[in-house]
Amino acid sequence: MTIRTLALLTAATIGLAACGHSTSTASNTSTDTTMTADTNATTGNDMNAAAPVPSGGQTFVNTAAASDAFEIATSKLALDQSKSASVKSFAKEMIKAHTGSTGKLKTITAGLTPPLTPDPTLTSDQQSTLDGLKAKTGSDFDTAYASAQVAAHQAALDGLKSYGATGDVPQLKDFANGLVPIVTAHLNMAKALK
């Protein structure tokens, strides 16, 4: 929604309130609340408890947290299952970098008003990739890990650039833009593993 559209909607709402439509709305709300309460009592459902839609900032924070969690989990797995010194070295760097990124993200989000809480729950694709890596060893693992790292870092880079350009929280935009060169370097390192 653009700022112009939001301004028009706000103006229309204020205009309706000034014309005395608030009284009509109040009585309709009372009727709707009574109907909802009766329906809830009958069905046992709470229709007013719709899942809140996360803000752009919250969505970005959750995506970043899940990305870090995925990188850390797959890289810890690489330390156990890889035989390659270069893969293990890369994995150690990813654990260090993404642990630091998570710490910085938590600090920034805690200082926001209202504060945001990063949710590091992996997406179904991330979980599937992690599960697939658990079943591999040796060179099969190394190849799959490198591919997963390239894909994950490319997705992270795209997300950072997008939010950095159009995000709704200035501190998170700065965070995203600050990570672009680091994630670009990680992407290039992951491509070199292949």
Image (tube, rainbow, N blue to C red):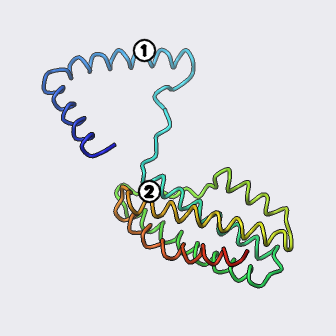
Instruction: Tell me which residue sits at (22%, 31%) in the image.
Output: 13
- Where residue 36 appears, as percent x and y from the top left, is 44, 19
In the orientation shown, which residue stands out farthest toward the left?
18
Given this view, does label 1 or label 2 mark the residue nearer the observer? 2
How far across and how far down the image is residue 51, in percent? 50, 37
Q: Is residue 100 above or below residue 122?
A: below
Q: Secondary structure at mark 1?
A: helix
Q: Amino acid at mark 2?
A: Leu
* Mark 2 Cα shell of 10 Å, populated few (<14), some (14-19), many (≥20): some
Number of numbered discs on residues: 2
Point 42% across, 48% down: residue: 55
Q: Which residue is located at x 53 percent, y 61 percent?
A: 64
Q: Tell me the quarter of the image containing the C terminus.
A: bottom right
Q: Earlier in the sequence, mark 1 or mark 2?
A: 1
Q: Quadrant of residue 24?
A: top left
- Above/below status of 85 relative to 51: below
The residue beneath circle 1 is: 35
Examine the rendered structure and indicate whether residue 123 appears above or below residue 158: above
Left/right of residue 102 with respect to residue 83 in the rendered view: left
Residue type at tag 1: Met
Q: Position of residue 14 (x, y in %)?
A: 18, 32
Q: Are marks 1 and 2 in contact (CB under 8 Å)?
A: no
The residue drawn where x is 51% and y is 58% is 118
Label 1 environment density (alpha carbons within 10 Å; few <14, some 14–19, many ≥20): few
Q: Nearer the viewer, residue 25 or 3?
A: 3
Residue 157 bears which disc, if any? none
The residue tagged with tag 2: helix, strand or loop? loop
Q: Nearer the viewer, residue 24 or 179?
A: 179
Say whether residue 16 is left or right of residue 120.
Answer: left
Q: Which residue is mark 2?
A: 116
Which residue is at the front of the view, 161 or 115?
Answer: 161
Residue 106, image x, y percentages = 48, 66
